[in-house]
Image (cartoon, rainbow, N blue to C red):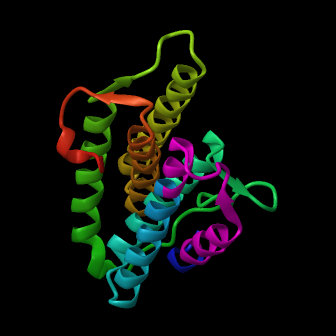
Amino acid sequence: MKIAECRDALATALTHCHNAADPPTPLEREAFAIREMAQAYLEDGTTFYHKGDLVNALAAFWYGAGWLHFGVSSGLQVYESGRPFCPFAGLSENLPLMFTEKLGEKTHRYEHLLNTARFSVECAGEPATISNAFAGKVLFITGQYAAQGAIYVKYGAHENALACFSYGHGWLDAGVTCGYFRIMAHHEIFTV
């Protein structure tokens, strides 16, 4: 998916999602936080995009998509017309050569960041609870995107790798924010 297409799809998805929980409840606050973060990264990515910073735009849009998809999967957000868009419907666009160094640096930094984050949390719920099972799903999804991103790095497809690392980190960060995980180390890399 091209960067502008991901931006537009995320913007459209946000207009077709609504919070699933009623105020004033803790679940409503979690749903609001999910939406607020996805919207913030849509806005940040749009600013980067208009300034010609395609690397940071790519990272922001896929990160925001990770937050939103976490929200839908957890039931905190309801998507009005079925399922939200898939930012991985096709390969990411190849960025111009002038971005090669920045893209490589950011991709490797985000790979390290995602792996550090994954191994810095533990499930917060009791083993037999529904919340613990969902936290396990989040860790599985995060691990899948970390692994897929590493494969893309191996083959030099840094745009796709950065998209995977950003998306996976969005899922994990949302899970931490909603209390599915305890941060055991590196508290500074999470948004809570």
> Which residue, as the protein is rendered here, is positioned at the far front?
24
Q: Considering depth in this image, is 94 or 119 the residue closer to the camera?
A: 119
Q: Provide the major secondary structure of the magenta segment.
A: helix
Give the total of numbered labels. 0
Residue at (29% x, 66% y) in the render: 103
Residue at (47% x, 12% y) in the render: 126
Residue at (43% x, 61% y) in the render: 37
Q: Considering depth in this image, is 151 or 14 the residue closer to the camera?
A: 14
The magenta stretch spans residue 23? yes
Instruction: Give the side of residue 64 with respect to residue 73, left or right.
Output: left
Residue 150 position within the rendered picture, expressed as x and y whole percent measured from the top left: 38, 43
Q: Considering depth in this image, is 154 or 135 the residue closer to the camera?
A: 135
Residue 173 position within the rendered picture, expressed as x and y whole percent measured from the top left: 38, 45
Residue at (46% x, 64% y) in the render: 36
Residue 112 position within the rendered picture, expressed as x and y whole percent measured from the top left: 24, 43
In which quadrant of the rendered image does the N terminus lie? Answer: bottom right
| The image quarter in which residue 95 lies | bottom left
Magenta residues (range): 6-32
| The image quarter in which residue 9 lies | bottom right
Instruction: Give the side of residue 50 with respect to residue 145, left or right.
Output: left
> Which residue, as the protein is rendered here, is positioned at the far top?
128
Q: Considering depth in this image, is 112 or 174 the residue closer to the camera?
A: 174
Residue 44 position within the rendered picture, expressed as x and y whole percent measured from the top left: 37, 75
The magenta stretch spans residue 171? no
Q: Is residue 45 above or below residue 129?
A: below
